[in-house]
Amino acid sequence: MTMNSTHVPAGYDPVTLEVLRMRLDSIVEEMGSAMIRSSGSPVITESGDFNTALFDPEGRIYSYSDFVQFHIGSGSVAVQNLVAEIKGEPLHPGDAFICNDPHTAGSAHPPDTNVISPIFYGDELIGWAQSQAHLVDVGGMTPGGFAPGAYDCFSEALRLPPGVKIFEQGKPIEWVRRVLLNNVRVPTLFWNDVRSLVASNNTGIRRLFSTVEEFGLAAFREYTRVNFEIAERVVRERIALLADGVYEADEWTEHNGHINELYRVHCTMTKADDQITMDFTGSSPQTDGFINLSYGTLVGSVASALVPILAWDVPFNEGVMTACTVLAEQGSLVNPVPPAPISNGHLTTGARVSRLVTKLLNEAARTSTSELIRARTQGVWADSWTGGISAGTRDDGEYFVLFNMDGGGMGTGAQPVTDGLDCGGMMTQVNNSLPDVEMNEMLYPVLYLWKRLNTASAGHGAYRGGQGHEFAWKLHGTPEVIQTVFAPNAQVVADGFGGGFPGGGSGHAVWRTTNINDLLDQGTVPTDTDLTAGARELLEINQQGVTIGSDDVFMQWVAGGGGYGDPLLRAPDLVARDVADGYVTDAVAAKVYGVVLVDGEVDGTETERRRAALRVERLGGREPAVSIAPGAAPGSSAPQRDSDGWYCPASGARLSTDDDWRGDVLTRSSAAAQRLSELGVRVRSRDAEPAVLIDELVSPACGTLLETRIRVESRGKEAETL
């Protein structure tokens, strides 16, 4: 964020403001380093599934680390509820409190455990250090803390509300430690991670104390207050550039762990001047499955999309979210009450919230008068974690729980100027990383057979969505494991923007009684073509208690992001490169992108003919009345608005004078899984009601693909559009 005279109030030194802000940011990053160096869990050390933060005495954010963004809301709720819970109780340096209950402490799910420590300057409380990480096991019915089979929160984990003190004046409270370790499956790893969270907080306490000592307490308070105000002002300036209006959209959470139903996530976004209200009234009621989303994580999921889209260069503190109000009905899917189970709400419904906010901001940004804001439109990210947790006993008798962080390898949405990132992670994972194959094989009894890009996952477009990845492993050092899986982006996949197609979905399979051991004995590097199986079992979207044996092979594929712009506007040389890299086939290049290759080289004349023929096909056999402008920009298929109404920038063809242009263009609807399969994109089919459809909206004048959208529809009911 650039400081200038319009942002810095009179009487405050901009250099001091920036030095103090960067000092706070540096402290929370150092806290993260301390956690990584003291933890023994690869969830923390390899994949960075944690956050660190500093808060003021009331629970307002001084600074927040850029590891997992949806912890913004859950961490804030945890600190604020702790402050309320222990009001009037004595506090001492060295105290630390632990909590993980989504209902009372705001956690995303029970494995995300908070340790919160008071910070004193002399005898005065000046703030809180907060560290939160995913701990490998927290008890409950299922190893790893994800419980698809749970019908209530009491089955999911040991629930710790705010106010449970774990350290007192620097020493662990022994009876609390004993109770905790008696309720988890891997007590040594659990306790070491709790200590690493305490170590992280202690680092933050020391560094903040020295900072206050250097600047003085009065100056520290004043300058942090001003930094709050500056962050809020910059975000409000960005919001003011969005088009005023009321925008509505839906997303859908798949399968609640018990039944393959679709659950509505609805949001009405009202943008007026420099304020946004996100109202989730109309979302489905809470369910008895593990997909409910805590309110704290709802706020964090909104922030996960809002911050990178509108506040991409604004250092995060309390001021960033002040201009956004988040409303949700109690007892709903996005603000549940006990006994709603909640162990996977953040990676299912929470991810849908981030996708939903992205779509709403796309609509408000597309008609902005600011080119800077229009450039923030994008394909929707896959943004739903595909999880696998394995538990069993090694050959040496040691019990283990593997929460495989490879689930974070989903593709991101395409941008107005470039393809999406392959395996880029969720929007909330600013510092996403995937575990090394060698590290997982060293720590756990699995042997990877392959790990590669899932080339059936990227959303096609003038710029492609990012690809997810796929992998397979067999057991190596244990006779069998019990597997839990969840694939929340299987049927209702991520939309593209401006004519870009949706990305592919995710899933799991087990190939039973394979020849894998024979192949390895022969020294053959296994591939999916060499591998034979007695049965190929497609697992449910959410499933627990799956037994995997030594002759079985476990497979997982991860979803991709939505594309941006009409694929016929993609540069032919980029398509040729994609074919050479194995990202798309020759057939897809011709069928989707209209690019004809001869010996790997673009045939310009045939490509022009093929693209013209595809536009005629879109128009039902009719020649376009308006031609695409020579050199049309890749993203110029997204409809824009001027004083005369809507038009297609790629050709200049007029579309509509209505507020919503979609009623005046050609629309083709079909089953999403079938249609995307024709385009080389893998999506799980849905035979039950409601149906998952794809709409392709085409300019009737020039044949440009203006928009594709996933839509959920029930027979005899008004269609509800994503």
Image (cartoon, helix red, strand yellow):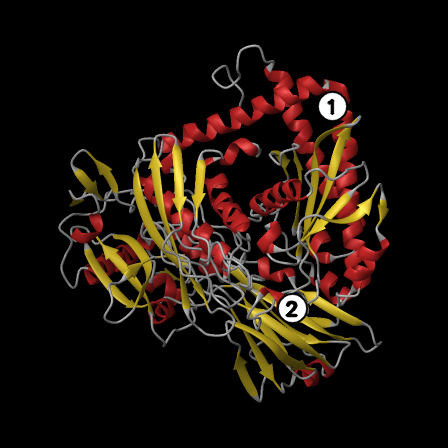
The relative height of residue 610 versus residue 631 in the rendered view (above or below) is: below
On the question of residue 502 being in view, the answer is yes
Give coordinates of residue 698: x percent, y percent: 23, 55
> On the image, which quarter does residue 406 sit in?
bottom right
Q: Nearer the viewer, residue 596 or 564?
A: 564
According to the picture, the residue beneath numbered tag 2 turns out to be: 389
- Label 2 Cα neighbours within 10 Å, binned few <14 / some 14-19 / many ≥20: many
Left-right relation of 128 to 580: right
Give the secondary structure at mark 1: helix
According to the picture, the residue beneath numbered tag 1 turns out to be: 212
The relative height of residue 403 versus residue 35 in the rendered view (above or below) is: below
> On the image, which quarter does residue 119 sit in?
top right
Instruction: Looking at this view, name the residue that lies furthest to the top.
Output: 11
> On the image, which quarter does residue 61 sit in?
top right
- The three-letter code of the residue at mark 1 reads Val
Give the secondary structure at mark 2: strand
Q: Nearer the viewer, residue 126 or 482?
A: 126
The structure residue drawn at horizontal position 56% and vertical position 67%, both measured from the top left corner, is 152
Give coordinates of residue 510: x percent, y percent: 58, 79
Instruction: Looking at this view, name the residue that lies furthest to the front.
Output: 88
Left-right relation of 498 to 49: left
Q: Earlier in the sequence, mark 2 or mark 1?
A: 1
Give coordinates of residue 34: x percent, y percent: 77, 43
Query: Which mark, residue 259?
Result: none
On the rendered image, what quadrant is the N terminus found in? top right
- The three-letter code of the residue at mark 2 reads Ile
The structure residue drawn at horizontal position 82% and vertical position 39%, both measured from the top left corner, is 94
The structure residue drawn at horizontal position 62% and vertical position 36%, both measured from the top left corner, is 59
The structure residue drawn at horizontal position 53% and vertical position 52%, both measured from the top left corner, is 426
Give coordinates of residue 368: x percent, y percent: 32, 34
The relative height of residue 510 versus residue 315 in the rendered view (above or below) is: below
Left-right relation of 355 to 448: left
